[in-house]
């Protein structure tokens, strides 16, 4: 049982590309190091060690992108690691039951993995539904915070997600570190410094 579940997760992680859907946002993964996040008014492209963040847009088109080195915050929220994070968490899972074709998984994790400003532990109960030998959905209930947290992650387009390319150079500006890492700054020419949480040393 445990071996079959871990094999399912590993096979999913080995896919060359897939799309993750969560909370109305999409995150496309393309091996080995590309991703594209679209959620609400936010868009981010990651290619290797470089990230491109939408600075301004009209309707469905981004008018200006900001180019910056890949930061830990961007990697964790919109990078390739973010696309694979939920799956990676299950590679070592051991409390697993197969019921009605889906795997029910229980784990205890530090609250900080879900809510960075909290201490303690969470009980995670997840239902993992496979399809065609890969993970199709993960539905999670987290106990330990009030109210309890619930969310669902859906995976699609295995091996057929759209290619991820850098934005056009004529719509891209290079960002530099901000003097104050807690803010983003702009000037007469538009955005001049980089992403929230990245100050200059």
Image (cartoon, rainbow, N blue to C red):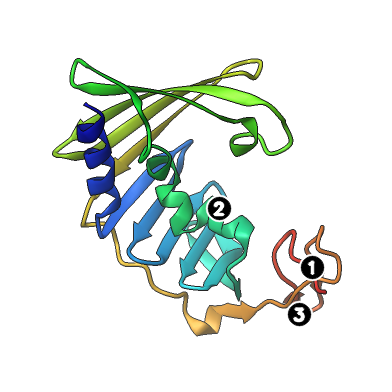
In the displayed structure image, the side of residue 12 where residue 61 appears, left or right: right
Residue furthest right in the image: 180
Could you tell me which residue is drawn at 55 percent across and 51 percent down? 77
Residue 156: name its quadrant: top left
Judging by the rendered image, the residue that carries numbered circle 3 is 189
Could you tell me which residue is drawn at 40 percent across and 67 percent down? 33
Residue 139's place in the image compared with 38, above or below, is above
- Could you tell me residue 29's position as x and y percent? 36, 57
The answer to whether marks 1 and 2 mark residues whose Cβ atoms lie closer than 8 Å is: no
Disc 3, SS: loop
Judging by the rendered image, the residue that carries numbered circle 2 is 76
Give the mark, 1 or 3, whose residue is nearer the N terminus: 3
Residue 182: name its quadrant: bottom right
- Could you tell me residue 108's position as x and y percent? 52, 25
The foreground one among 25 and 73 is: 73
Q: Quadrant of the N terminus?
A: top left
Give the mark, 3 or 2, whose residue is nearer the N terminus: 2
Discs 3/2, front: 2
Disc 1, SS: loop
Residue furthest bottom in the image: 170
Give the mark, 1 or 2, whose residue is nearer the N terminus: 2
Disc 2, SS: helix
Q: Quadrant of the C terminus?
A: bottom right
Discs 1/3, front: 1
- Crowd band around label 3 with a 10 angstrom C-alpha radius: few (<14), some (14–19), many (20+): few
The foreground one among 40 and 140 is: 140
Judging by the rendered image, the residue that carries numbered circle 1 is 199
Could you tell me which residue is drawn at 26 percent across and 29 percent down? 2
């Amino acid at each position: 049982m445990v071996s079959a579940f871990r094999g399912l997760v590993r096979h999913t992680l080995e896919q060359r590309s897939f799309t993750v859907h969560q909370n109305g946002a999409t995150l496309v993964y393309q091996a080995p190091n590309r991703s594209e996040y679209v959620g609400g008014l936010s868009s981010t492209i990651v290619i290797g060690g470089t990230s491109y963040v939408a600075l301004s847009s009209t309707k469905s088109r981004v008018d200006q992108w900001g180019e910056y080195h890949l930061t830990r915050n961007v990697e964790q929220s919109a990078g390739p690691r973010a696309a694979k994070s939920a799956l990676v968490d299950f590679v070592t899972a051991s409390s697993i039951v197969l019921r009605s074709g889906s795997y029910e998984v229980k784990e205890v994790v530090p609250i900080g993995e879900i809510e960075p400003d909290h201490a303690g532990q969470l009980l995670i109960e997840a239902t993992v539904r496979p399809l065609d030998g890969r993970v199709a959905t993960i539905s999670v209930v987290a106990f330990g915070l009030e109210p309890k947290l619930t969310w669902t992650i859906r995976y699609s387009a295995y091996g057929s997600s759209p290619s991820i390319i850098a934005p056009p150079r004529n719509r891209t500006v290079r960002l530099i570190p901000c003097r104050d890492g807690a803010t983003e700054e702009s000037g007469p020419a538009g955005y001049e410094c980089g992403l929230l949480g990245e100050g200059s040393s």
